[in-house]
Image: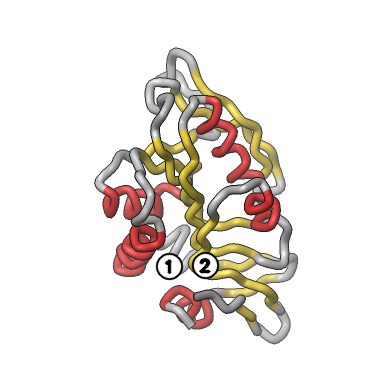
Amino acid sequence: MNFLEERIVKDGIIKSGNVLKVDSFLNHQMDISLMEEIGREFKRRFAHKTIDKVITIEASGIGIAAFVAKEFGVPLVFAKKSKSINIDGDMYVAEVESFTHKNKNQVIVSKRFLHEGEHILIVDDFLANGCALQGLISITESAGAVVEGCGIVIEKGFQFGGRVIRNMGYHVESLAIVDAMDAESGKITFRAQD
């Protein structure tokens, strides 16, 4: 087991409906030492790529992506789920359906922050059905930027999202891939990785 799988087993909570709660250390309360380790691991896995910016979606991805961007020494851009009065000018827009929240959002990024030819690493906390990643890929490619890869903290391997994104030809690195989990027993099975 890797460092993240160990932490999921120790502190993750499996709920009915294929929900894995990791809010005590990842996406509500954050373990900063763990975030630093996640940032270093994504840097290691994508070290052979040119990365100009990291992009994610608010809110849960921001903290994680900040540590990744710090490791690469590049800016972090996050897609906003709603337009506010302080966002002006032209924007890239994509519709994203949330597995967790069971709703659709239009996510937006100002055209001032993504440019043609930039090399982008997409980072998010979870990969379930792949809609968030597809939205970020769409925004990135609309800008004429290059998706160098997708860094996912936890992938639900029993759902189709990872397979869809990989079949589209994108390089996806997931730090933990959950192949099965059972709310009654609390048992979680991880996919073996190199």
Alpha carbon distance from label 2 to label 1: 6 Å
Q: Secondary structure at mark 1?
A: loop
**Looking at the image, which is closer to me, 127 or 147?**
147
Amino acid, disc 2: Val
Query: Which residue position holds label 2?
Result: 22
Residue 171 is at least partly visible in this image: yes
Q: Is residue 113 above or below residue 97?
A: above
**Looking at the image, which is closer to me, 173 or 85?**
173
Number of labels in the image equals 2
**CB atoms at circles 2 and 1 under 8 Å apart?**
yes
Query: Which residue position holds label 1?
Result: 25
Q: Is residue 56 above or below residue 45?
A: above
Amino acid, disc 1: Phe
- The residue shown at (41%, 47%) is 62
- The residue shown at (43%, 45%) is 121
Residue 119 located left or right of residue 157: left
The percent position of residue 27, horizontal first and vertical second, equals 47, 58
Q: Quadrant of residue 111?
A: top left
The percent position of residue 143, horizontal first and vertical second, equals 49, 25
The percent position of residue 15, horizontal first and vertical second, equals 67, 71
